[in-house]
Image (spheres, grey):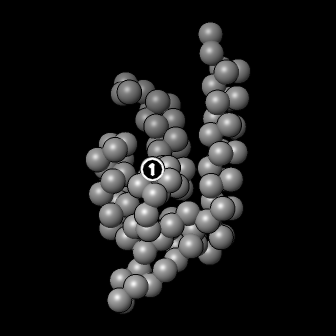
Amino acid sequence: MSGTKALERLRKKLTIENLWLYIIKIMMDEAKPLKAYDLKVKLRERFGINPPAVTVYTVIYRMNREGLLVKRVVNEETFYEPANKGIEAFKQGVLFIEETLAKLKI
């Protein structure tokens, strides 16, 4: 998707600015706690999204603070997993996107 600035903005809004959706999706699919670095790698591998590490860490921090993630420390390593609130927010977010897309279809 290239060509216009409008399309570039759309791509950024639907990816980088909404990383929380992709992070929850990865965690739900993996079904195990993950480290922040692992999430950054999987964002690139699965979705072709390659944000700066600081962006990923900031989003994870905010998600944890909001109660969307559960943080666990095991042997001095920090892992994250989706909280029920995060899974519910993900489902609502996807539903919103589907409803919006249905309204925009030609």
Among the 4 quarters of the image, the one containing residue 34: bottom left
Among the 4 quarters of the image, the one containing residue 32: bottom left
Residue identifier under label 1: 29
Residue projecting furthest to the front? 31
Q: Residues within 10 Å of mark 1 (few under 14, many from 20)?
A: few
Residue projecting furthest to the bottom? 76
Q: Residue at x 62, y 50 (%)?
A: 90
**Residue 10 screen position, x and y as percent:** 51, 35
The answer to whether residue 19 shows anywhere in this view is: no
The answer to whether residue 25 shows anywhere in this view is: yes
What quarter of the picture does the N terminus occupy? top left
Q: Give the answer, above or below, for where 93 lies relative to 82.
A: above
Q: Give the answer, above or below, for where 64 lies relative to 29.
A: below
Q: Identify the secondary structure beneath mark 1.
A: helix
Q: Residue at x 52, y 73 (%)?
A: 61
Residue projecting furthest to the top? 106
**Residue 88 screen position, x and y as percent:** 68, 53
What quarter of the picture does the C terminus occupy? top right
Q: Give the answer, above or below, for where 2 lies relative to 74.
A: above
In-front residue for pair 50/9: 50
**Residue 49 screen position, x and y as percent:** 36, 47
The reply, left or right, for residue 14 in relation to residue 90 is left
Q: Residue at x 30, y 57 (%)?
A: 41
The amino acid on which the numbered mark 1 sits, given as a three-letter code, is Asp
